[in-house]
Amino acid sequence: MDNQKTLGKIKRAKNILTEIKNHVKRVNVFEDERVRGEKLAKLDELERKLSNYERKLEKGEIEIAFMGKEKVGKSAFVNAFIHKKMLPSAQERATYTITELRYDEKGRVVVEFFTKDEFLNQVFRPILKDIEYPNWREQDLDTITVSDLENHFFRIREEKPSLYNEHYTRGRNDLKDMIEGKHEILLFLDTGKREFSENMVEEYKPFIVDRYKSRAVKAVTIYSEKLKDIPNVVIYDLPGFDSPTFKHTEFTVKKIKDSDAVVMLRDIHPSITGPEVQIIKQTREDDGVELKEKMFFFVNRVDTLHTLTDLKERIEKFNLELKNYDLYLDGRIFYGSALACLYKDGEDVSEEARKAFEKVTDFGDDALSSVERLYEALVEYNQKERSRILEKRINAIMEEINKFINEVLSSLKVKEKELDIFAFSTKIALDIRRDAEKIKRSIEKYLNELKSRMKTAPLTSKLTEIVKNNISNLSNEEIEEIRQSVESRSSTSQEQPERFNIEWRSKLMDKIRSQFAGSFEAVMNEEIQNVENEITELFLNALQPDEREIVKSTVKEYIHKGMKPLFDTSALELFVDRFAGHIIELLTFPLGLDRYNKFKEVSKDIYSIFIFHRDVELSSLDTLRLAVFNVVTQEMDEEEAKNQLTEIFKNVNEVDIGEAMQILSNMFGKFVPYSFVIRRLLPRKEQFEKIGFKLSELEGIIPPLEPQDYERILEQKLKEARAANYEEVRKEIERDLKNLKAVLENCVIRAINPEDAFINQTTKYVNILKNSLDSEEFDKFINENIGLIRKDKVSEAVRKDTEKRIVETIIDSLETLKAELAS
């Protein structure tokens, strides 16, 4: 294996992993938070392994794990492996200390102690968490007593028996020892490292064998010059499979997976059972390397067997078992006695060691040199096999990364389709289009409601009220100003009633014309504004925009643009002038011949307006003439005539016939038609005849007038009418003002018929607006305002579009990373 090339591959893979993790965090590739957490944890684990392999390559380091059951003679084996008795015997050693072996030119032992935080967070509290102790994060050695611990296990024995059974022996014993030995443990926490020479066994021995002191020890590292053939070796003396400290199991599994080689120690009963089987299952394969590829076996304590035949049978049986577990490789099984090896090296001169040596000598050189042969096999493995296996592991990780990239790519490509902004935006537009259909139906319903509302004549009522209350004469100050102006231009000191009359009327009629047109425009504008507001609400209620107030103004702009002619009231003044202009112009002239001449000029228009008078009977021209002439001449109007007739004949039995005839004659002289009087007296004909008042005699008083007679009388009366002074001018103008207001109220407003005019115009332009909902103009409106109408949806669309762009970028990046990984 080309180390530099492989190191380059590892560094590239680590960079790729970093980018992948950033991508996974950037977009929700895995929607499920738990799954995403697991995937990121997997990436972190791959990165950790690569860093581990990178370190091994850079330092030329090889990790070897020694493992086996407790009491299998591991301490003696470690001492025999380094040809130095530096570890206490199995009978003396505690089970809590992790021991490392490393090469150094000078033999020594380094003891590293936990800091208090490390001890609490890596040792003490994790066990509390596993046994589900209350508030385990806040506990320390001073907050829990042995009694508290026993009470907790008493509780969970009833409530959670499986938890109790799992942890009563191991977890309880660990915690109990820590609590009971806390004073000794605390003495060494936070004290860092202590170094001893290889001959100071009795000084460092307590930190390995003492029940309490050893718990403060994070690691013991033995440096030996005997490992010179594999100088970069790191050997882990793993806790036994059956260690009472259950946290050791996790450490053992991890180190077996990480190590380049594993040496399993067996005793003379080599059958694999119990916790060993579980460990093997957990470490069966890691990064594409089967456990057997890096496994070595040492069957210890053969000195306890009686015959070579017995030894061979046991070894053969062990071989078969390894084959059953798919752990067998030829040349990987060694057998012997660590104790005998120590005797041979002069490190153990006990009688027990001597006997072991003699027994093993009988079994031959293979048994006697077994530890050396295993050492040599490991050296050879390091030189020949270890690089191949390491490369295989690195390639397996590369393949894992590639698989992960493919998985992410697959998820992202599905997500890319889900983020189809075109389909999403089209749906938003179609939804608004469907809402536009609601607007159409609402408009149709609204027009029907508006027509029903107009039948109550609300506009006519408003205009009539304005005429009654707001159409008024000039102010006293204005009138006085006109008088002074007239007199200032006169060459005499006498009153100038004719000039005063003309100028007063001119200014008054201009004011009335402006007031009436302005009032009509104001009333119509108010109703148009109501329509605009109500149609705006129809739009808003159908569209249901997210930004209602902002959209409201844009909807109004759209409506205003679509119904523009309706909102343009500049022509209303001409419209009003068409109906009110002639009567106002006529009354600009004082009583007199000029008024008569003007009347002849505009009589047709005047008559056409008076046709709308509610008291005019179209079947009788007399009532029409009465209404017109009494306005033109200020003679008796219809109301006065009714009142006089009522007064005359209030009490039939007391009527003075001569006086009645005189009054009636006077009425006829004032254009009160004969037919008008007869119609009102006819219902009481019998009563009148009883007192000698015959209705037939009325015709003799004055015969019915012919049309030419009306014209003649009208001319005569107007010729004779002249205001002789200022007071008469005032009375004449006040009577004209009263008559004009009555004409505006009873004729002009009815002739204009504002409700019909309003409905006709509104219907026309609202329908134009409704039809515009199918036009490109409305499409443009939607496009310009879709971000306000469907703000949330558009924001989502923008988010989707942004996310899609990110996804597309990540897909491109992952494809590049995939190609880079394969290169």
Image: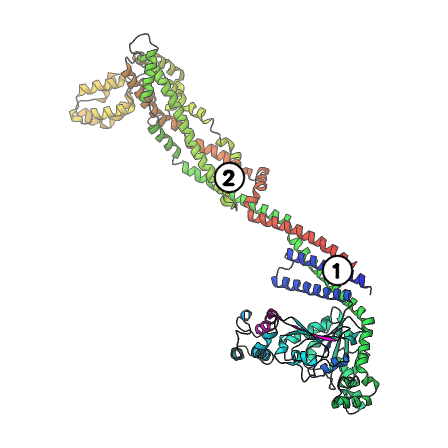
What's the magenta region?
106-135
Provide the secondary structure element on which disc 2 rests.
helix
Q: In this view of the protein, can residue 297 be seen by the observer?
A: no
Task: Name the residue: 58% across, 47% down.
Answer: 794
Identify the amino acid type marked 1: Lys
Depth check, front residue: 638 or 368: 368
Q: Nearer the viewer, residue 638 or 338?
A: 338
**Furthest residue in direction bottom, as rendered:** 306
Mark 1 near mark 2, Cβ–Cβ under 8 Å? no
Residue 314 falls within the magenta-colored stretch:
no
- The residue wearing badge 1 is 11
Quarter occupied by residue 504: top left
First of labels 1, 2 by sequence position: 1
Label 1: which secondary element: helix
Give above or below for 752 relative to 315. above
Place of residue 205 in the rendered image (x, y in percent of width and height, measured from the top left): 67, 80
Task: Say which residue label 2 marks.
Answer: 553
**Location of residue 524 by image quarter:** top left
**Foreground residue, 487 or 84?**
84
* Image-based side of 55 in relation to 152, left or right: right
